[in-house]
Amino acid sequence: MISVLSTRFRTTYFDYFSSQEGQDLNPNKTIMSSYSQRIVDPHVGYKKVLVTGGAGFIGSSVAEYLLERGDDVVIVDEMNDYYDVELKRANLGRLTERFPKCDRLSIYFGDICDESFMIKIFATENPKWVCHMAARAGVRPSIADPYVYIHSNIKGTTQLLELSHKFGVLNFVFASSSSVYGGSRSTFFSENESVDSPVSPYAASKKACELLAYTYHHLYGLNISALRFFTVYGPRGRPDMAPFKFIDRVSRGLEIQQFGDGLSSRDYTYISDIVDGIIRSIDRPHKYEIFNLGKGSGTSLKEFIDLVQKHVGTRAIISVLPNQPGDIPYTCADVTKAQEMLGYRAKVSFEEGIVKTVEWYNDERESKGLRICPETQANGIGRAASFTELTSLTSQN
């Protein structure tokens, strides 16, 4: 059920229908009808898919799924050091091990903003499907260094859109973010909401990508789906994210930092559910759509920490600190649209996901000697324990 609509939509809807005798005044029913009219049948044949950011957490997981089902995959990744490059190498190594001597997997190392490099890839590989997962992520790091977000996210996405239209790409799917909702007070974040007030450079860059994508659809008829991810986690997840950090630090008996009173809440989405939503979007060439991909329910920070303690088997050492600039106090996805138009359903509960992630972490640590230190990731600015004070950065000028 869609619980919340933007004020503008709600007013327009009821102003119109209040004068219509005998009309059903339920806006949810009208929206559901609109969704059903825009449903696209899935493409079930072979695809060659360009996956940018294919060495990353989400990108490599998507590439693995595509290869498993028989598609060709072209990975492009610049292997930047936002987090430990060894993790990205390990992701690529897992793919090449699972698909040895596979002529269906091509890997290129370079910057998606490098025009001649990307033109050569499009001309050589001729992918007709694009899954654009490459991006600079993170709210707090974007406040410290906004320029790299303009380069990687906005310039990089524009470059890919331009090449996709020129080379006749059939469907362009890219990663947006729940961060675009800013300080929304809605119970569930709906794609119908106005998102014109981003609270971080990262969020602003993702909103800009959505606008540019619509422009390319309008001008050239490029089929596009923008996917607003809600806090993705799981085995091999990014080490700057709270799930990895909390599990790691609690396991090692180190202090974790709780920003605020612990009542802030996130819609944490397990990696297999996100991959399912991405694949469904790739297979359905919608004209232009934005989809929330989340679990559809929130977990408070206190509950999160309790679950980590429970399944790690160690009590957390907690330092309570003030809320951080740019952080959103609450996220929860309204996934009605993705359910109706993609057949998307999140299947993994947060506790089940934490159990799976702890099991992976323990296995990596015991059998392979996991040596990733979260405090060194994202330039030292992560979502959990951090040694960078952003208040001093935001008070400058």
Image (cartoon, rainbow, N blue to C red):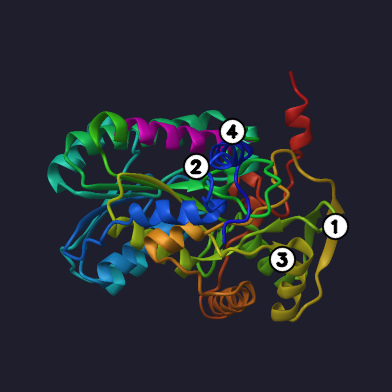
Characterize the local packing of mark 3: few (<14), some (14-19) or many (20 or more) Cα atoms within 10 angstroms. Answer: some
Q: Mark 3–mark 1 contact, CB under 8 Å?
A: no
Q: Is residue 347 above or below residue 268?
A: below
Where is residue 392? Give x, y as percent: 78, 31
Q: How far is disc 3 from disc 2 in space, using C-alphas?
A: 24 Å
Instruction: Give the foreground label among 3 and 1.
Output: 1
Residue that numbered label 4 is attached to? 201
Queried whether the magenta region covers residue 215, the answer comes back as yes
Q: How far is disc 4 from disc 3 in space, using C-alphas?
A: 28 Å
Residue that numbered label 2 is attached to? 136
Q: Amino acid at mark 3?
A: Arg
**Secondary structure of residue under mark 2:** loop
Residue that numbered label 1 is attached to? 319
Residue that numbered label 3 is attached to? 249
Q: Which numbered disc flags the more N-terminal residue, 4 or 3?
A: 4
Q: Residue at x 50, y 56 (%)?
A: 29
Magenta: main secondary structure = helix
Q: Quadrant of the N terminus?
A: bottom right
Q: Amino acid at mark 2?
A: Arg
Q: How far is disc 3 from disc 1 in space, using C-alphas?
A: 12 Å
Q: Which numbered disc flags the more N-terminal residue, 2 or 4?
A: 2
The circle on residue 98 is none
Queried whether the magenta region covers residue 309, the answer comes back as no
Q: Is residue 198 left or right of residue 93?
A: right
Instruction: Give the magenta range.
Output: 200-216
Q: Amino acid at mark 1?
A: Ser
Characterize the local packing of mark 1: few (<14), some (14-19) or many (20 or more) Cα atoms within 10 angstroms. Answer: few
Q: Which numbered disc flags the more N-terminal residue, 3 or 1?
A: 3
Q: Name the outermost residue toward the top.
A: 397
Q: Which numbered disc flags the more N-terminal residue, 1 or 4?
A: 4
